[in-house]
Image (tube, rainbow, N blue to C red):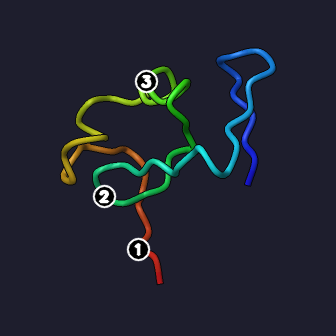
Amino acid sequence: MIEYCRDYENHVCHPESSWKEYDARGIYLCTVCEKCVEKKLAKYRVDVLTDANYETYEPIEPED
């Protein structure tokens, strides 16, 4: 899947050089590459990325 980076004009994360990032609970966040990973993950709280017991105000449904 090709994902366009909103943070970098005209930048595309190509499938061969990108990967999926997940939160500490294994919930998909976004697709990143070396160029955009830092900027994209900076939008998330540190605990969301590192603590599986992070506080949330939305219900989290288990995957089947």
Name the residue located 43 percent from the left edge and 30 percent from the top edge. 41
Q: Nearer the viewer, residue 27 or 18?
A: 18
Place of residue 53 in the rendered image (x, y in percent of width and height, measured from the top left): 18, 52
* Secondary structure under the numbered disc 2 in the rendered image: loop
Q: How many marks?
A: 3
Name the residue located 67 percent from the left edge and 51 percent from the top edge. 15
Q: Which residue is mark 3?
A: 38
- Amino acid type at mark 3: Glu
Residue 62 bears which disc, if any?
1
In the image, taking residue 11 as reference, residue 26 lies left or right, namely left
Q: Determine crowd level at label 1: few under 14, some 14-19, many 20+ residues with C-alpha closer than 10 A.
A: few
Q: Nearer the viewer, residue 28 or 20?
A: 20
Where the N terminus falls, by quadrant? bottom right
- Amino acid type at mark 1: Pro
In the image, taking residue 27 as reference, residue 3 lies left or right, namely right
Mark toward the start of the polypeptide (2 vs 3):
2
